[in-house]
Image (tube, helix red, strand yellow):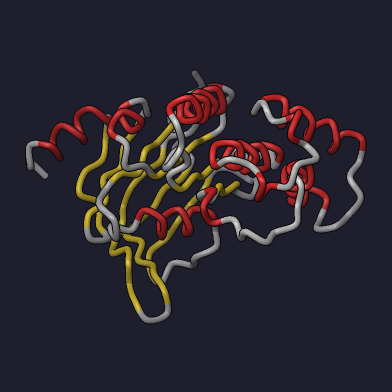
Amino acid sequence: MHSSSTPAVRLDTLTAGYRSRTVLREITAEIPAGRVTALVGPNGSGKSTLLGVLAGVISPAAGTIARTGARRPALVVQHSGIPATLPITVRDTVAMGRWAHRGPWRRLTRDDRAVVRDCMDRMGIAGLADRRLTDLSGGQRQRALLARALAQESDLLLLDEPTTGLDIEAQQEISRTLRETAAAGVTVVHATHDRAEALDADHCVLLRDGTVADIGLPRAVLNARATGRN
């Protein structure tokens, strides 16, 4: 497994939120490079907001965020957030991952198309390439969204509860892909409510009320949470 003494992301007293509401308060944490980090905590603790900050779509109100990677982060939203009327195929969805390199609506090169095919194959959805995204099951949609993120070829992959609402087989497929992606040197950060999924990570950040309640090895963080020691 890839490892590095330099963290992929360093947050220093970071405060962030939305126009009328502060969500994260003085967050200080490091995200290890080339590892899987699980963000855990109750609803409203700030997990999605932190992912938004890491993705660059939410700007800090105070504090700093420093990244060692040079590529635009890839963010995977929950499959249930896809509009029911979106008229886009699986192939088109995955091809959108190449926009980070090519620009929106630009014609894909042969290399781009090869990356798209490879990512669909990797997620087992090549046979669904011409299907509309909204016609798929939740697990199939989530695999398509993950394939799009992989097609971006980023060094930082961010996922907001990627296995929520999926069957066991789909959950295992997503989890396996995250492990393989980290093993290839990509930093993976995912929010989760699933204890087993969090335990399978290399690193864990526990948020509570917009602050870091604990951080470290998943088993230590989750056991301390279960016994109320943090």
- Which residue occupies 85% across, 36% down? 113
Give residue 180's position: percent from left, percent from top: 55, 22
Q: Is residue 169 above or below residue 149?
A: above
> Residue placed farthest to the bottom in the image?
20
Q: Is residue 88 above or below residue 113?
A: below
- Which residue occupies 84% across, 38% down? 112
The quarter of the picture where the C terminus appears is top left
Residue 12's image quarter? bottom left
- Count of marks overlaid on the render: 0
Residue 148's image quarter? top right
Give residue 121's position: percent from left, percent from top: 72, 25
210 horizontally vs 105: left or right: left
Give residue 6's position: percent from left, percent from top: 45, 35
166 horizontally vs 22: left or right: right
As rendered, which of 105 and 64 lies closer to the eye? 105
> Residue placed farthest to the top in the image?
1
- Which residue occupies 60% across, 37% down? 140
- Which residue occupies 69% across, 30% down? 125
